[in-house]
Amino acid sequence: MSRPGTALRSHRLMLLATPLLSLALLLLCSSGLLPELQPVLHGQTQTQAQAPSILQSPSQPPAQTPNADANAASNGQVAQASRRDSSRPVFHTGIDVVTLNVTVTDPREKLISGLKSDDFAVYEDGVQQDLAFFDASDVPLDLALLLDVSASMEQKLPFVRKAATGFANALRPGDRAAVVTFNNRINLSQPFTSDLPAVTRAIEQSSASGGTALYNAIYVTLKEFVRDARRDDLIRRRAMVVLTDGEDTSSLLSFDELMEEAHRAGVTVYTIGLRDERIPTTTASRDHRYFSQSDYCLKTLASETGAVSFFPDRLVDLASAYDSIGHELAGQYALAYTSKNPVKNGAFRRLVVRIVNRPEWRPRTRTGYLADTLHVAAFPAAGTRQ
């Protein structure tokens, strides 16, 4: 016969173990160690589980691994051009590179175009680096659209669908987009593809219900970006646009854990926080929202990854926020360099970019990276090899 209180203690232990087990499953699924459980995490049925990775278009060929070209570049030099396909020559390198997406503005926040590689100076932990690659227009973009479809978004979704669809249709040839919707679950609505009508359909089919697992959704998408970068050695700009209307209510991860993964992934994360139009937007209310947990997280995530955050007061202003992001992405500079510090110890390395001879101009990029995430990359022939 069991002693009094044994059943109660067992019940409490089960309650404590449940969230820890859930977190472990989330991390294992996002890392690909338990692929058979990913349909449960994403809320998919058994047939939906056959969908490709979030960053893998159904028709995309498997990534190639540099071999002879990589060996030719083992001394830090870019090898001769080879062709990944019949139309796009690339340059392979057998060295680890740090890639940066850089936006440059003047003091009035006007985008600056027409800069050359010699106009940029890049510093890592205070040490100036030598650029290995520079491009001002031709580097393709992978863009993940994350849409909050929790129950509180029901009345806002018509505006969101219209604005997000217009934004997706402005992508350039060669760019790819994916659509991820989230409430208390994370759902892949459309894998990465250059088929814009398919992206539009995924946006228009979104519907609202449930809670808000904001951190989980961003984290899992960032993990997929990292895995894709390891599969594909071609330099691509990678960005994410996250739209939400409130606090995270369902995630198992903390914001600090999310920020660590953001530093590791090197993805530019733009954030849009929708305000409640029923609340008067007086100066006092704006000041209060500025110090809210949700606003702090959205602002910090954007600034640390080299992006900006938007907080439209009205739903009709949502399209303007998307337009601003699209305009900025179209004017970004792509830079890459080989770090003069070869040690991969997982430490955070601080990055600073300056415009030579124009100190009043403001280059913006990610604040740094974790030194365990460098990867072999290939340089598009359209870019300038330094």
Image: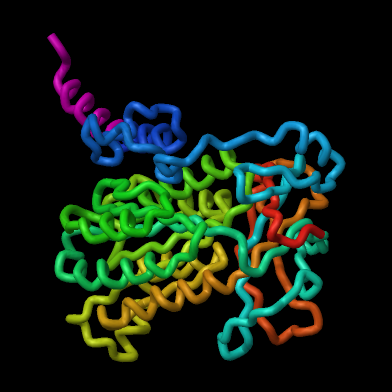
- The answer to whether residue 16 of the structure is visible from this angle is no
Q: Tell me which corner region of the image, top left, top right, bottom left or bottom right, holds residue 196.
A: bottom left
> Where is residue 267 drawn, in percent x and y?
53, 56
Q: Which quarter of the rendering shows the C terminus?
A: bottom right
Q: Residue at x 82, y 51 (%)?
A: 340
> Where is residue 242 drawn, in percent x and y?
38, 62
Q: Tell me which corner region of the image, top left, top right, bottom left or bottom right, holds residue 10.
A: top left
Q: Is residue 223 above or below residue 49?
A: below
Q: Is residue 275 above or below residue 226?
A: below
Which residue ends up furthest to the front in the rendered image?
A: 86
In-image side of 10 versus 363 (left or right): left
* Magenta span: 1-18
Q: Which quarter of the rendering shows the N terminus?
A: top left
> Where is residue 165 drawn, in percent x and y?
31, 67
In-image side of 123 versus 220 (left or right): right
Q: Nearer the viewer, residue 128 or 188?
A: 188
Query: Magenta segment, principal secondary structure?
Result: helix
Q: Nearer the viewer, residue 362 or 10?
A: 362
Q: Tell me which corner region of the image, top left, top right, bottom left or bottom right, holds residue 36.
A: top left
Based on the picture, tell me whether residue 109 belongs to the magenta stretch.
no
Q: Nearer the viewer, residue 7 or 271?
A: 271
- The answer to whether residue 379 of the structure is visible from this angle is yes
In-image side of 356 versus 25 (left or right): right
Based on the picture, tell me whether residue 4 belongs to the magenta stretch.
yes
